[in-house]
Image: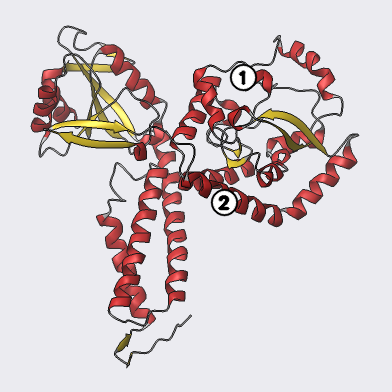
């Protein structure tokens, strides 16, 4: 590494001071983030989409700096760029994360939301309103609805949202109520010509036009828009479960699991001693689970129950008032859990030995939780898609509510992950897992 601060010309090479380089680089970075629309109101606070855009802008900028420095024969040390890029990116990401958390709290309180006017048939408008109400962090507040003429009388309400007019008057209504965006749901009465004219009417008004699709849980990388004779066709790539991306995921899993295991080895030793000395039985508990493509493997956990827990399952089911184990079944008050086990479960520390399953290739760091055969036997076609990838030590549903989610929500999140996986998304889920583990949110 070279970190000199002088200005010199040696053999035709220009060596700028690193203070000057840092100032120019920081300025260029801010400009690049602005040009890359990382601060656009549709992106700020969105989470993965925002972080992904910041990451993309950053690596392109530093790649361009490296090329320019080479072409102009500027003596900028590789060590400087290798240090500045990850440090700067980490600081920018940390800042974005802090602002996002603040923004989410304010949005939960009803502040900083963009007013949204929904256009469409009553049932489809109600469905969209429900989805937006379940996602307050998205930053949209539905302020009104416009429906086909005669379907609902003006002044009536759909999901407590007032009907403010007909589809034909949507642009005028949006202006009058100060809406930031108009969302068009599928409706027979809305033709391509109607949408085009609505776009014309909204021109210059600072109001966004959004079209909703009936296709759910398909992420951007799988979607490509291709205009054909002025008609926009949306292609959806089929999800892929093999290839270079999954080789990269396997490398990430193994290296990540190895590093984590080494770093937390003192903690693993302490937990093993606590389990061994506070209750009778083995330190580890192993159970057969179903993995990728239905392959069976033995999952490892720290024992958090009494040694004869399996023999007392019928007793627990009777206390819970259920006859058998269902999907994602987990007793609310399980008398078999030891005192140490309760703490391990609250902070998910009992799951840490599954790092060895990851090193062995049975599991991934991130993926759907592995389930027992009795649960898999209850799968429908949708749930079976969880088995197209390796099960994970952590996953999307674990960082999005854990035991507080319904079965349907959990399966939907898992399938969404399976079909739209990205390495960057895995990194974010691992980071969110650290927070969930530290706070014990949603644990049971």
Horizontally, residue 190 falls left or right of residue 368, namely left
| Tally of marks | 2
Residue 440 in which image quadrant: top right
Q: Residue drawn 29% across and 16% down?
A: 124
Nearer to the camera, 268 or 404: 268
Instruction: Quadrant for the C terminus, please.
Output: top right
Residue at which label 2 appears: 251
Horizontally, residue 169 falls left or right of residue 2, namely left
| Image position of 12 with respect to 50: above or below | below
Residue at which label 1 appears: 327
Residue lying farthest to the front in this orientation: 243
Q: CA distance from mark 1 to mark 2?
A: 31 Å
Residue 363 in the image, given as x and y percentages of width and height: 63, 39
Q: Is residue 278 visible?
A: yes
Q: Residue drawn 33% across and 60% down?
A: 60
Callout 2 secondary element: helix
Which is closer to the viewer, label 1 or label 2?
2
Residue 27 in which image quadrant: bottom left
Sooner in the amino-acid sequence: mark 1 or mark 2:
2
Residue 372 in the image, given as x and y percentages of width and height: 68, 24
Q: Is residue 303 visible?
A: no
Within 10 Å of disc 1 (Cα), the crowding (few <14, some 14-19, many 20+) is some
Residue 306 in which image quadrant: top right
């Amino acid at each position: 590494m070279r970190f000199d601060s002088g200005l010199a010309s040696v053999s035709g090479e220009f060596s700028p001071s690193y203070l000057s380089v840092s100032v120019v680089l920081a300025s260029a970075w801010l400009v690049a983030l602005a040009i890359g629309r990382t601060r656009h109101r549709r992106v700020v606070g969105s989470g993965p989409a925002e972080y992904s855009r910041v990451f993309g802008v950053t690596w392109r900028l530093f790649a361009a700096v490296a090329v320019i420095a080479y072409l102009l024969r500027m003596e900028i040390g590789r060590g400087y760029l290798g240090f500045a890029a990850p440090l700067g990116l980490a600081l920018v990401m940390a800042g974005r994360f802090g602002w996002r958390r603040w923004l989410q709290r304010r949005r939960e309180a009803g502040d900083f939301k963009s007013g949204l006017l929904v256009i469409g048939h009553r049932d489809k408008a109600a469905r969209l309103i429900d989805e937006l109400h379940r996602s307050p962090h998205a930053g949209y507040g539905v302020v009104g609805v416009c429906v086909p003429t005669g379907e609902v009388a003006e002044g009536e309400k759909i999901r407590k949202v007032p009907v403010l007019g007909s589809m034909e008057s949507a642009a005028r209504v949006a202006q009058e109520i100060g809406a930031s965006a108009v969302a068009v749901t599928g409706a027979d009465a809305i033709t391509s010509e109607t949408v085009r004219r609505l776009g014309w009417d909204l021109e210059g008004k600072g109001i966004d036009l959004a079209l909703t699709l009936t296709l759910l849980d398909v992420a951007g990388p799988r979607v490509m828009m291709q205009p054909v004779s002025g008609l926009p066709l949306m292609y959806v790539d089929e999800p892929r479960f093999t290839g270079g991306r999954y080789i990269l995921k396997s490398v990430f899993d193994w290296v990540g699991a190895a590093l984590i295991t080494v770093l937390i080895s003192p903690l693993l030793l302490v937990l093993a001693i606590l389990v061994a000395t506070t209750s009778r039985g083995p330190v580890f508990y192993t159970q057969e689970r179903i993995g990728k493509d239905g392959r069976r493997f033995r999952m490892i956990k720290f024992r958090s129950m009494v040694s004869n827990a399996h023999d007392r399952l019928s007793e627990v089911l009777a206390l819970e008032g259920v006859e058998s184990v269902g999907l994602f079944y987990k007793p609310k008050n399980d008398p078999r859990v030891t005192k140490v086990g309760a703490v391990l479960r609250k902070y998910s520390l009992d799951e840490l030995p599954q790092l060895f399953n990851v090193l062995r290739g049975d599991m991934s760091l991130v993926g759907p939780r592995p389930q027992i055969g009795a649960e898999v036997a209850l799968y429908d076609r949708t749930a079976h898609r969880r088995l197209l990838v390796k099960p994970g030590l952590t996953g999307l549903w674990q960082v999005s509510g854990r035991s507080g989610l319904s079965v349907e929500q959990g399966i939907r999140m898992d399938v969404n992950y399976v079909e739209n996986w990205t390495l960057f998304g895995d990194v974010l889920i691992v980071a969110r897992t650290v927070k969930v583990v530290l706070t014990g949110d949603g644990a049971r």
